[in-house]
Image: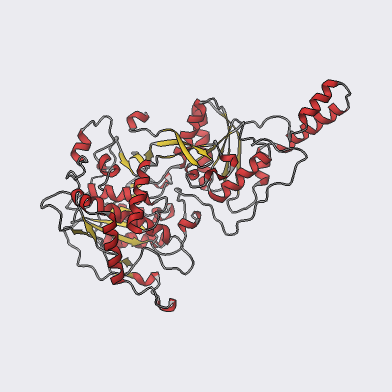
Amino acid sequence: MRICYLTLFRASLAGLAALSLTACKHYLAHFQTATQAPSSAPAATSTPPSSRLVSPAPIRQMRLPSRPQGANPIQQQSAGGRPNAQTASSANPSRRPSPLSEIISQPRQTGTVTAPVPSPPVVHPMPGQNPMIPGLIQDPETITGPEMQAPAGALDEARFTAPPPPPMQATVPRVALLLPLSGPHSKLGNSLLNAAQLALFHFAGKNFELLPQDTKGTPEGAADAAALAIGDGASLVLGPLFASSVETVAPPARAAGLTVVSFSNDRRVAGNGVFTLGFLPDEQVERVVRFAFKRGMRRFAVLAPDNPYGASISAALEAVAVDLGADITGVRFYSPLGGDFSAVVKNLANYDNRRQDLLDQRKELENREDEVARQALKRLENLQTLGDVPFDALLVADGGKRLQAIAALLPYYDIDPNKIRILGTGQWDADGIGSEPALVGGWFAAPAKKERRKFIRQYTEMYAAAPSRLATLAYDATALAAVFVKSDGQFDVSEITAPQGFAGRDGIFRFHPEGYAERGLSIHQVQERGTRVIQNAPASFQAAN
């Protein structure tokens, strides 16, 4: 099945300087009003998402009347004075990431608990909560959270029925975009589609067609979508989102000679014509552990969910520890479907033994009557355990409600955040992370936020809603396609594997020869109100090496 979408604006860099995103949003809203059923129609007669799957409907760019004749929207210098693609790539190639760096980066426009031990913190079960793994897409079951799920029975916000499009032109380059536009992950999929449309507005010429295909969030749906894309003459495939879907898309795409740039970050599906643009968890682990090691931490422990994501985290920690000569003194996994993590945290802290050591010490001192013993007993009054935990830093590889629940248990079981540095992954890169006191002062590695903030502002102005965290992946991928797919539909994979990389909405990135994306990451520290960068991401891969 195919999805029919609105024909977008055609705009050069000069055109965008003259036309605000607000005006574009107004035009888009006007067109939707003309093509959608009235919102006041009874729910029983509303068109369900599945009925919007119609005949092939490429997304095209429209020419704006103000566009200068002959202007090239990729190479033309904007009214704001930003350099064109040629200038960006030739200014200092040894220090700047790729010919696309300017294009993508600048589009137009606690203390211990006093004994006796109280009851543990109440951890309410979270029925139906699957592992929330923003940025890590292993399979359809690993995504949850408000930004990734549409309300039951609700129509997808960003989808609408448009008139039948004009016939596709045989000479126009076509790029397929495979996303879960229906099903439980439709909200996430449509957010990525919106981001891709925004990239088209910024970068693509009029002779460029984006072909959205609905994968329905399943491997079978992805295979059907790939078949349609190949039949439509796509020169490049962007997506799908889930690793399990990539596995079904790769063989037919490879047989057709098409490159796949997926949004997964499971490096197991990368290679042999498949690239993964997602945020790699092992890269985040390596970055933050190396940072901690340079600051004197030598013994590391990890708490991670018992799933492929947790396994990748543990393997990454082991690899970097071996390389650095550090020790791993504790590895504990927990069920991501459970709501009570007390047992695993208690076990990691060696709490029972340390508690018994304290009781034994008190008993011994109580049997003595000298002043030294009395002073020692006084010092033990406010202790919960005796002795330290066997690690200097603890990596908690989770986010959302599970991270909050686990963090609340750390000081209770005498893992003192004032003595132990708590480390995290990109899942910590979320609003409200500092609301849990045990996490304040913790470190995590994540992409730089400067360019993403600009993207969020532009997206919100266009669509009157905030983008999903993964929307930047679709934006950057579409920008690459718009620049590197030639007018005759030819695509040279060497264009996107340039070693200097690109400056995208999440900072610099480049594709490794094996197919996965390497990124420059910042080190962030959790504060009570948000986070702050304590070490910037590298400005280029030369600087990172």
Q: Which colour scheme is used?
A: secondary structure
Q: Residue visible at 27% across and 65% down?
A: 57
Exactly how many numbered labels are in the figure?
0
Residue 238 picture location, percent across and down: 32, 53
Taking the image as drawn, is residue 514 in sight?
no
Taking the image as drawn, is residue 82 in sight?
yes
* Quadrant holding the C terminus: top left
Q: Residue visible at 44% across and 60% down?
A: 185
In which quadrant of the rendered view does residue 355 lie?
top right
Q: Is 210 situated above or below 378?
A: below
**Depth check: 292 or 264 in front?**
292
In which quadrant of the rendered view does residue 234 lie?
bottom left
In which quadrant of the rendered view does residue 506 lie?
top left
* Quadrant holding the N terminus: bottom left
Q: Is 251 situated above or below 414?
A: below
Residue 274 picture location, percent across and down: 34, 48
Q: In this view, does 79 lie to the left or right of 185?
A: left
**Depth check: 537 or 493 in front?**
537
Residue 53 picture location, percent across and down: 34, 69
Q: Residue visible at 46% across and 37% down?
A: 532
Q: Is 292 situated above or below 514?
A: above
Taking the view exactly as shown, the residue that stands out farthest to the left is 69
